[in-house]
């Protein structure tokens, strides 16, 4: 109705709202995506190396190398999925589109477990690095208390919605990469080149090579370095031209992960024995990169790198803890928006405009998870295995979803389409996705069978989530499209 | 100078209304087009496409008001709601995308720690804008 005409009693004015027409300003480019993803991957080297060394001993570089190969399969699948479905849910989104809502929820819930475990491990490994300045932080009880305090602090600032400085993050990540590259180069030149036999001795010498089950377990735990794959995918909807930039960011991450993980693990085993590297109490399992810095052959270099590693590791791990928290709150909102979790979990605070319920709830769970740290300094390896349980399950489902989409929706636009396809009944199935599915599922089964803590805690978490999901789906208010009466089939 | 395309970012202050009147008068001379945008800043704990009803309702009201000001001035404005992580980059990006000749912003007098402050958005726009910027302060 034109505004110029006077209103009469009974007239109804309909004015379409702009509400469905708001536009999203996507600003992320390859550097932004890479720095977000590398923030996670780069932080994982600060604890993954030690946790892997506990079981894989001298075979740590081999375990990390095999994990790196699987990382390539995962990153490639996520590159196809992220470019095809640029949404915030990552694997939960692929599984929802590719399989169904329930599998989407299972992937999302498993991803939540890995986010919580990442938060707990990252926070737990900050105090050992800072113990360079304050040795008291090396005590298990004080370190655990500080880690809990860190999560509580992040909970408060995220509920309040304090703006994080993107520029500062990028600066820290730049410094972090520079420091890691310097450590690798110095380690190779000053330690490995001087005594090349030491690496072979520490890897293959008597008592250094692990038993085969331990090697397999080491490969499984090395999946800790997979953090970051999901982060980039979660940022897909914020990326300008995601079809091009997401695959580019993944390629960069693959290169960075392979080079740095290989380099740092080789230097670590050149600088110390695997027993020292994998000892959480008197060795360097909780702060392996600090161990490399402390074993550099020159006192001047030690004086430069030891405090630098302490500060950088603490800052990157803090960023990773926060990234885990941001990831889980976004994911909760995503799942609740798609009727997979109760709306109450994704509720937004009226004043701070943040999903306060999700932030508080998952921070409290992460704090509770840190509880055993007061008595058992070795427990962070269990946290690592729990992360592996959650992440491998969601990677397996992500691969399955990508394959399912290739079968069900072969004509869906795929700006980044994987090559090396196997043709079955006119369907193109990418070899890397099949390999990714088999390797991730295989390692997940190994973890479930051999690790009682991961098995019971992980399966318990999944069972709890499914109970919430089933009850919620039974009693939820159905969206309008589900009310439509379906036409009866002709008899 | 010709102002064929003018961008007026609004936040709901009284200065916005005066800025819109000024934009209408400037654009009228060259029969230019005016876009008015409200940027909803989404915190990083939420997906970028999160619909925060209260924020969108507020944006609707402010843009309705701005449209009515343009009508009073016997001119038209196209309005839009943008969702972004940061307000400043969103405004600059919009200006680049639309190829505007002018950004006209109304600013309120604000103090921070006892000192006059422009906040974060205005300095960012001034520093990064691809075109001339006029600030209107009441």
Image (cartoon, coloured by chain):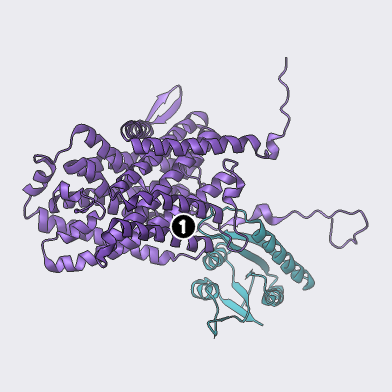
Chain colours: A purple, B cyan
Is A128 on the left or on the right of B52, as rendered?
left
**Residue A7 at least partly seen:** yes
Percent of width and height locating residue A383:
35, 46
Q: Is residue A102 above or below residue B57?
A: above
Q: Looking at the picture, how far across and down is residue B102, in whole percent?
A: 60, 73
Residue in front for this viewpoint, A307 or A163? A307
10 Å neighbourhood of mark 1: few (<14), some, or many (≥20)? some
Q: Secondary structure at mark 1?
A: loop
Near-viewer residue (A21 or A139)? A139
Task: Identify the image quadrant of residue B98.
Answer: bottom right
Determine the residue located farthest toward the front in the rendered image: A375
The picture places residue B138, in percent across and down from the top left corner, at 66, 82
Q: Is residue B138 above or below residue A26?
A: below
Q: Is residue A43 left or right of residue B115?
A: left
Up-down relation of residue A421 to residue A28 (above or below): above
Instruction: Give the tally of numbered discs.
Output: 1
Q: Is residue B37 left or right of residue A390?
A: right
- In the displayed structure image, the side of residue A152 where residue A146 appears, left or right: left
At 52% across and 29% down in the image, what residue appears?
A408
Along the line of sight, the residue nearer the viewer: B10 or A472: A472
Which chain letter matches label 1?
A: A
Is residue A414 among what the camera can see? Answer: no
Q: Nearer the viewer, residue A476 or A23?
A: A476
- Mark 1 sits on what residue? A28
Residue A247: x, y in percent? Answer: 40, 47
Determine the residue located farthest toward the top in the rendered image: A491
In the picture as drawn, the residue positioned furthest to the right comes out as A9
Q: Residue at x 31, y 39 (%)?
A: A70
In the image, residue A26 above or below residue A393 = below
| Quarter placement of the N terminus of chain B | bottom right
């Amino acid at each position: 109705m034109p505004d110029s005409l006077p209103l009469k009693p009974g007239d109804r004015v309909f004015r379409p709202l702009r509400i469905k027409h708001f536009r999203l300003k996507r600003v992320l480019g390859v550097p932004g995506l890479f720095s977000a993803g590398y923030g996670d991957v780069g932080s994982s080297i600060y604890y993954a190396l030690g946790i892997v060394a506990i079981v894989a001993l001298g075979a740590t570089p081999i375990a990390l190398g095999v994990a790196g190969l699987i990382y390539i399969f995962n990153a490639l699948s996520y590159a196809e999925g992220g470019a095809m479905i640029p949404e915030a849910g990552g694997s939960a989104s692929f599984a929802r589109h590719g399989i169904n809502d329930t599998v989407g929820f299972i992937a999302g819930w498993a991803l939540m477990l890995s986010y919580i475990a990442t938060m707990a491990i990252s926070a737990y490994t900050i105090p050992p690095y800072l113990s360079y300045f304050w040795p008291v932080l090396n005590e298990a009880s004080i370190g655990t208390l500080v880690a809990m305090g860190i999560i509580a602090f992040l909970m408060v600032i995220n509920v309040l919605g304090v703006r994080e400085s993107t520029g500062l993050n990028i600066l820290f990540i730049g410094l972090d990469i520079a420091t890691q590259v310097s450590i690798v180069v110095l380690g190779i030149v000053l330690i490995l080149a001087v005594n090349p036999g030491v690496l072979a001795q520490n890897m293959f010498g008597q008592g250094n090579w692990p038993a085969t089950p331990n090697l397999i377990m080491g490969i499984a735990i090395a999946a800790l370095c997979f953090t970051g794959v999901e982060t980039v995918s979660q940022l897909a909807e914020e990326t300008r031209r995601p079809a091009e930039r997401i695959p580019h960011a993944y390629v960069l991450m693959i290169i960075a992960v392979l080079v740095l993980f290989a380099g740092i693990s080789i230097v670590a085993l050149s600088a110390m024995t695997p027993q020292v590297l994998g000892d959480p109490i008197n060795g360097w399992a909780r702060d392996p990169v600090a161990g490399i810095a402390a074993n550099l052959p020159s006192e001047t270099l030690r004086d430069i790198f030891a405090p630098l590693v302490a500060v950088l590791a603490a800052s990157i791990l803090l960023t990773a803890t926060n990234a885990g928290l941001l990831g889980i709150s976004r994911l909760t909102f995503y799942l609740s928006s798609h009727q997979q979790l109760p709306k109450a979990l994704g509720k937004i605070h009226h004043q701070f405009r943040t999903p306060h319920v999700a932030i508080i709830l998952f921070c409290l769970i992460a704090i509770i998870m840190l509880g055993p740290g007061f008595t058992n300094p070795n427990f962070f390896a269990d946290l690592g295995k729990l992360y592996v349980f959650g992440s491998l399950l969601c990677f397996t489902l992500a691969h399955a979803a990508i394959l399912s989409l290739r079968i069900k929706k072969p004509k869906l636009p795929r700006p980044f389409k994987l090559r090396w396809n196997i043709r079955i009944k006119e369907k193109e199935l990418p070899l890397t996705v099949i390999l990714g599915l088999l390797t991730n599922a295989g390692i997940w089964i190994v973890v479930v069978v051999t690790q009682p803590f991961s098995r019971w805690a992980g399966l318990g978490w999944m069972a709890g989530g499914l109970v919430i999901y089933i009850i919620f789906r039974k009693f939820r208010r159905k969206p309008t499209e589900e009310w439509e009466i379906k036409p009866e089939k002709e008899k | 100078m010709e102002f064929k395309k003018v961008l007026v970012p609004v936040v709901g202050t009284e200065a916005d209304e005066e800025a819109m009147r000024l934009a209408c008068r400037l654009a009228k001379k060259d029969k230019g087009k005016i876009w008015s945008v409200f940027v909803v800043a989404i915190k990083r704990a939420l997906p970028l496409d999160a619909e925060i009803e209260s924020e969108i309702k507020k944006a609707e009201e402010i843009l309705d008001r701005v449209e009515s000001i343009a009508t009073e001035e016997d001119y038209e404005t196209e309005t839009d709601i943008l969702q972004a992580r940061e307000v400043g980059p969103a405004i600059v990006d919009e200006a680049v995308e639309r190829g505007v000749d002018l950004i006209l912003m109304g600013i309120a007098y604000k103090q921070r720690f006892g000192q006059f402050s422009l906040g974060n958005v205005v300095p960012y726009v001034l520093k990064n804008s691809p075109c001339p910027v006029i600030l209107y302060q009441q």
